Structure formats: C-alpha cells, structure tokens
Image (spheres, rainbow, N blue to C red):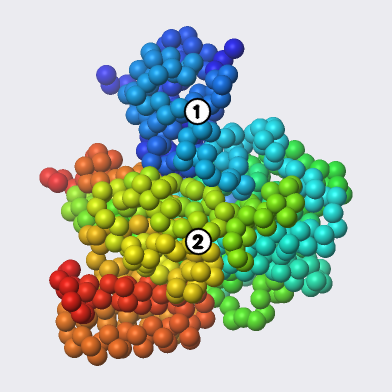
Amino acid sequence: MHVPSTSPPSAPPDREVVVGEAIALLRHEPGALLPILHHIQDRLGWLPPESLPRVAEALNLSRAEVHGVVSFYHDFRTHPPGRGVVRVCRAEACQAMGADALVAHARARLGVDLGETRADGGVTLEAVYCLGNCALSPAVMIDGRLHGRVGPSRFDVLTAGLAKEGA
Amino acid sequence: MSTRVYVPADAAARSVGADEVAAAVLAESRRRGAAVELVRNGSRGMLWREPLVEVATPSGRVAYGPVEVDEVPGLFAAGFLQGGDHPRKLGLTDALPWLAGQDRLGFARVGVIDPLSLEEWRAHGGGRGLDAALALSPEAIVDAVTRSGLRGRGGAGFPTGIKWATVLQTSAPQKYVVCNADEGDSGTYSDRMLMEGDPYTLLEGMLIAGLGVGATRGYIYLRSEYPDAERILVGAIAAARAAGLLGPDVLGSGKAFDVTLRRGAGAYVCGEETALIESLEGKRGEVRYRPPVPAVSGLWGMPTALNNVVTLGSVPAILADGPEAYAARGTGRSRGTLAFQLAGNIRQGGLVEVPFGISLASLVYDYGGGTASGRPVRAVQVGGPLGAFLPASALDLPLDYEAFTARGAIVGHGGIVVFDDTVDMAGMARYAMEFCAIESCGKCTPCRIGSTRGVEVIDRIRRGERRAQHVALLRDLCDTMTHASLCALGGMTAWPVQSALEHFPEDFGLGPGPGPRS
C-alpha cells in the first residue's frame, strides 16, 4: 500500500547554521576542537572545507592546526560519504572468523574499494579496527548500527539496498 | 502483577537481534493480554547465547537463549513467563555452570540490572564503595587501593595505588581523573560491557578516584566505535547529576566531582595515555615524551589519575568489601580478578571474570569450548594486537602478569583471540606491522617507518626472496622498534611478529613444513 508522505523529505541541514551552532555551543569547552568537529560531522556527515577556517578562527588556532587534527583522525571526513556507510572490521578476532574473505565479498558486492565512496554516491566502504563485538565475529557496522556473525549471505541481506547494480 | 522479562540492550546482543526479540516480546504479550515489564539489561556475558532472554520467576531468573525473533510466540505458548519448558530453556541463570564458576566483582551487576536505574544499582550493592570512601581520608582511600594489589587493567599492569599516591602527593590548583575508554584492542570488549551494563559503577570508581587524589573534574575518553556505550553514559551522567551523585556536593558530602564525556575519533594510538591526553586537549593524538608522567603533569599540565574503565570499575568493590578481600584472590603479584574476554574463533565466546591464576587452556577449552569451526586450536593471541601469539602447546600458561612476561607474552586487557589451524601466521605477522603503520601517530621514526618496512620485509620473506637475510633483517627491525619507539605501539608490535616467527616458522617458509600459505 502506498502511503503518501505528509511532509516533504527533510532538507539537508544548512551548513553555515550547523557550523555556527557548533562553535557557539562548544567554543568555551576546554579542548573544544574535537567536540566541535564531531558536532559538525554528526549533522552534516562530513566536514565541508569552508567550515574549517571558521572553526580555526573561533578557537584562535591556525588553519594548519585544524587541518592537522582533521587529517590525523580516521573518523573525520573531508568528502561527503555515500548514502550508506558500511564499515567492516578487519581486526584479529574478526580475521579469525573470515574477515578477509568478507572484505573481498563486500568490495565485489558493493562495487567499491575500502576507504572509497562509489561513484554514484550510493555507499562508502571502510575498514574498521575493532567494534568490540569480538565474540560474535565477523562484525560489521552499517550506518552506525552494529551487526554480529556477518557471513557473506547475511552481509547481502543487510546491504540489500546498497549493492552495486547487477551484483 | 506483571512479569519482568529481560532482553539485553548490550551492543553485542543487539548485533544479533536483541531489539527485534524485545519488540516481539512486547507485541506477543499485548496480543495475549499478558502483563510483561520489559527490562533492557546489559549482557550476562554469555555472548554466544545472545539474544539471551530471562524471565523473573519466584525461584529466580530463568534463561532462554539464543532466542530467534520467530521463536517468541512459541516461548509464550510454552509458558515461558512461568519458566516453562522450551528447547531454548537453559535453566536458572545463576546456576548455569558458565556463570556459577565465575567470581564477579567489577561485573557483579552487569546483565543483572537495568543499567540506568539508580534504584536497582543501589539495591544490588552499588554505591557502597563510595559510601565507604566518603568516610575516609584521601590517604586512606589510596592506601586501600594500594593494599588491594590492583594493577592497571588497560594493559600496562601498573599498580593503581602507586599512581594515585603520586597524584595525591603532587600539589596543584586543579587535578583530574581521566577514564581511558578507548578500548581499541581486538578481542577486548569488557570496557564496553561495563559501560553499557553498569555505568554507575564506572562513575562510582571515578568518584572514589577523585576523592582519593583530590580531583574535582573527571573525563571519560570514549572511542567513537561505541555508540551504544555513549548513549548509556550520557544518560547515566545526567541521572547521576540529577540524583546528586555527581556535582558540586556529592551526596551531601560537601565534596565536588563532575564528569564530562568526550568522544575519540578512530585513532587506536589514543588508547596510549599521553596521546589520549593530547586528544582531550583538542590536538593530534601524538604521544608525549616521558617524564613527566601524567600523574605529575597530565591533562593541561595538571596531575592526572588516568585509568582504564575496568580498573576504575574494580575500585568500588575494593572500598566496599575491603582491600583484603580483593587481595585474597589471585596469584603472585597478580591480585584480584580479571574479566577475560573470549574472542575470535571460539565456540562459546564471552566474558569470564575469575581470579588470576586460571590457565589459558581452562579459559579456551572449559569456558570457550574450543574453536567455533570445530578445528584444532593453532594459535592464541592474548592482550590485543600488541600481544604475542602463543601456540596451542603453550596453553598451560597461568593467567598472571609475571608468568606471561616470562614467556615473552602479555596479559594486557585480558582479551583472548583464538585461531584455528587454517590461520596463516606469516599473514598475521604482516598484519601486525600493517596495523602499526595504519595507526602510528608518526612522532617517532622506528614506529612510523619501521612498521612500513616491516610489511615489506615480511612480504619478501613470504615470496622467498633471500629468505635468511630478510629474516635477519626483520629480527633486527623488531629489535630497533622494541627499544627505540616512544610508546607501546611501536615498542610492542614486534611481539606478535617475533612470536609468530618463533612458534610458526613453517608459515614463513623456514624449516620443515608445507611452507608459506600464500
């Protein structure tokens, strides 16, 4: 049954507003840089390049210092992620249960390499080093949701909407 | 009267369908008009049985598991609200041998209570350690922790009381308690389970630390890979403030202590204490030179008691029941209990809190039931990516800091990753170097460059290029990294590499055996 939506799809949050809000809310926290970057990325999915000079200015840091922090941490994105983000654990406990094969399967199934976003913007595939689910390996996180005991067939079910066309 | 049904909200349980099972329990109870009070507890730690559903009956909590979502109507039909028989019925939870043999101190309430209920936490003995500490002088608190023999559970095993005494004796306008919740070692999840299952006990440990060292501010540095723990800690901190447990006047004592939660950003090296401090200060997570140690000059240059989640979570029981009771457990200089975590290729993976001294074999076979694949155990890695690989023949080793060190291994954070006989140990050695290269903070050359060279040299060995020379080169490189790196990341990456080379030379094409596996 088709249910007509009563409201238009929510518009993406305004970048300038989000950055301003992050700065206003957090600039006086000691060591505010990481919390501000997280605040922005939590809402926008990434850190747009024009946001970083504003953050630097607000914290009285050089742009180089902010760039240094953004580039140091694996989590921070300087490019927009795909509509879905799939993170496959590559750490030892998951390797003991076939993580390498799962990574190979994921690359083929999603049509994208580790650390990359598919050209159509459909999905970003990333390696992650431990999700703390080591008794139920292999572990995968899809859009922030943890899944355990993910063999190739379960992976296909979980990523049904994200697969490369024809895969 | 409604029946209490427990379905864990622990991340591991959720990862295999606990939310769906919880929703099905509610839906089925409504359909049948059965009065059910659903509690989303932490996990009991029997992770291979998740989702583990428990029902409170007059004779105790009865466990069913692992429960598939489509089995829920059948459970109701079988009368599980009265503890009725069903193929998934395991029996009284507390009597299950896997749990009954454990000695849960830090994890006494994990999986038992609703993690965010202060009432249940109190009713199950939470807060007694803080009550005791509030009646003691700072010196007496630190002395109790020293006498308990508690050592850092994050991996380094440094005596907690000595660290605290240093902070206490260093005068400064502000001191800090920092909780290291950057649990990045593969095979470990005890920090996560404690934070998700009993967050007030962690806050209680931090409060006691604050009273002991004279700190009024606390930080929890939580890894970003743990969104469930973050959600629960946010709720716990807010509730603790509302209840006067945290704030300017802790439980009416006139003493102040508050906690701020900070999220990491995916850097393994930030589990190293000085890198963690840099990160809290808003910088790149680069390791600092030592001395000074953080206990003298840590966060913003102030004396900082920096401890792991499980270390802090162990403190309340020590204050509540006395350091002697804690010190009476264990072996040698490894006192008390450790929450071991069975992981990887293991049939019955989960959390086992027992006194030090248990053998690795007992954990892997008696608790773990051997491999998940049913194939022979070939190697076990204890203590995370910087821990040595032990061959199946070495599993008689008792879990004891000194006994492990004597064998060139570490207990670390108590994570035990099991591999079956299909593992390629040269591949694992390569991965150890690769992981170090990915996660190196870049400050010191042996770690930054050595790890990349290590990957290249292992590749050459595996391809059979001048194997003897390259093995000598690899050993030399390991030696350099061990002795010249700034922190444990570069300094201990050699351990898995050298132990793989020593115990499994055939995988590198050395000596007899089938040769490299790839």
Left or right, residue A22 beside residue B62? right
| B358 or B12: nearer the viewer | B358
Left or right? Give the position of A82 relative to B238: left
Residue B326 image-quadrant placement: bottom right
Inspect the image, locate mark 1, and give the three-letter code of the amino acid beneath it: Leu
Tell me the SS state at disc 2: loop
Amino acid tagged 2: Leu
SS of the residue under disc 1: strand
Residue A142 seen in the figure: no
Task: Give the percent coordinates (x, y) of residue B40.
Answer: 52, 32
Please say if B215 is above or below B98. below
Task: Sort mark 1 into few (<14), some (14-19) or many (20+) by Cα contacts within 10 Å.
Answer: some
Give the vertical position of B347 relative to B224 (above or below): above
Can you give x and y, in whole percent of width and height, for residue A78 in the image? 40, 62
x%, y% of residue B209? 73, 58
**In the rendered structure, the residue with mark 2 lies on which chain?**
B
Q: Residue furthest bottom?
A: B469
User: What is the count of numbered marks?
Assistant: 2
Task: Residue B70: name its quadrant.
Answer: top left
- Residue bearing the label numbered 1: B92
Q: Residue at (36%, 47%) from the top-left corner?
A: B369
Residue at point 69%, 48% (across, down): B317
Q: Which residue is mark 2?
A: B399
Q: Residue furthest top?
A: B33
Can marks 2 and 1 be said to lie on one chain?
yes
User: What separation in Å lies between label 2 and label 1 (alpha carbons)?
Assistant: 29 Å
The foreground one among B335 and B41 is B335
* Residue at the image point whose x is 84% and y is 54% from the top: B136
Q: Residue at the spot x=71%, y=36% of the render?
A: B122
On the rendered image, what quadrant is the N terminus of chain B found in?
top right
Decide which of tag 2 and tag 1 comes sooner along the chain: 1
From this view, report whether residue B265 is shown above or below residue B87. Answer: below
